[in-house]
Image: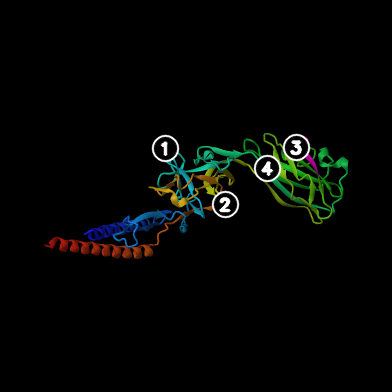
Amino acid sequence: MSNSFGLFSSSIMGMNAQAAALANISENISNSSTTAYKHATTHFLTVLNGFQDPNQFGGGVTTRSRYDIMQQGPLNATGNQTDLAIRGAGFFVVADGSGSTFLTRAGSFTTDTQGRLVNSAGYFLMAAPAGAAPDSLGNLQVVKIRNDRLYSNPTSSGVLSVNLPSTAANVPPANLPSTNLAGATYTAKSSLTVYDNLGAPVVLDIYYAKNAAEDWEVSIYEASGSTGGTFPYAAAALATQNLTFDPANGAILTGSTISVTPTGGGSIALDLSNTTQLGAPFIVNDSRANGNAAGSVQQIQVASDGTLSYQLDNGQLVSAYTIPLGNVRAPNALFNYTGNVYAANGDSGEISVAACNAAGRGSIASSTLEGSGVDLAAELSSMIIAQRSYTANTQSFQVASEILQVLNNLK
């Protein structure tokens, strides 16, 4: 008699297990178009009758569901700059309305009425503001696009790389540009535009004069102070510095950095380390500086390293945020919540954040969304198998019922 009841128990557990598998298959099929949905799988585990007997009988089965959170879904171009996908490992760090932190790979972000970037499930993207390190949850804040003001940044650094002709004639000390005299002469000249504290452009005139073999003087003036575009200037040079070069290969030996402070601006460090003295004409290889003129936000751009920049109406880019990627020690142990978000727990480990391409993280693809990880053909095949297994378990149940009926009819 106990064997008959064991048959009942096994078949019922089998039906429940296959029903759970069919539920997961149904969930997968219904989410075949959900952004960054991770495929749910059903794992079957043997259940024994509890007796330590090699001849035991009447066992059954139970199931556990798991989401393949580490699975990389297909990347689909959308054309929308605020649609973001992750190529590789990691998650976007998002927050709900109460400020609770979650992880997600669903990057279908748009701006709400307050300018905050929010995805279709209502979770807000978090990032480190420009200048803050993207390596701590405490440095993150909700990304907010401000279209109600102008943006400007003063120049703080720049790069100036030129070749100075080794065959140039020496300039007499009395005529060097640093004297700022009407008769001052120079070997070569270049210009660089920087920005003051209010975003106003300041043009710098940069003069190069050969002192001696492998020795050059660099003098920098504000162009606005020149007399007819030449000497004398209304004010002394912002900076004067000597450069020396290796006679063997023309590489710079001393003077590879020069600092200037333009009117109304802050200190600017110019990197001259790639400047050379070779047997070729004067040429400017690189001339650029950070900072930007005042302008309003036209659109945003997100680079693969997570840098979110404002593109201003003057064509310049202003770095506003750095989007980090979060991760945990055991991603497949994360709790799954409505809205395609995940919460950390004791099994998964705490959330840690780092910059893109660092600490095993992937990179960000803008104007792209990660597709669902569901393979419809595979799900339909699994559905047929689960349905047949369910039917087989019902047959076992029916057999058990018939056996019990026979036993009940014995006299």
Q: Which residue is mark 3?
A: 238
Screen quadrant of the N terminus: bottom left
72 to 263, vertically: above or below: below
Q: In the structure shown, which secondary structural element does the residue marked by tag 3 occupy?
A: loop
> 31 or 227, which lies in front?
31
Q: Residue at x 81, y 41 (%)?
A: 177
Residue 230 relative to residue 70: left or right: right
Q: Tell me the CA gap for discs 1 and 2.
A: 30 Å
152 to 387, vertically: above or below: above
Q: Which residue is mark 2?
A: 357
Query: Amino acid under label 1?
Result: Ser
Label 4 packing within 10 angstroms: few (<14), some (14-19), many (20+) = some
Specify which label sits upstream in the sequence, 3 or 1. 1
Specify which label sits upstream in the sequence, 4 or 1. 1
> Picture coordinates of residue 213 (x, y %)?
87, 50
Specify which label sits upstream in the sequence, 4 or 3. 4
Q: Quadrant of residue 217?
A: top right
Residue 314 relative to residue 110: left or right: right
Q: Nearer the viewer, mark 4 or mark 1?
A: 1
Q: Which mark is residue 385?
A: none
User: Visible in this render: residue 248?
Assistant: yes
Q: Nearer the viewer, mark 3 or mark 1?
A: 1
Callout 3–callout 1 Cβ contact below 8 Å:
no
Q: Tell me the CA gap for discs 4 and 1.
A: 40 Å
Q: Which residue is mark 4?
A: 157
Specify which label sits upstream in the sequence, 1 or 2. 1
Q: Tell me the CA gap for discs 4 and 3.
A: 15 Å
Screen quadrant of the C terminus: bottom left
Please provide the residue range marked out in magenta: 234-242
Q: Tell me the CA gap for discs 2 and 4.
A: 25 Å
Q: Which residue is mark 1?
A: 98
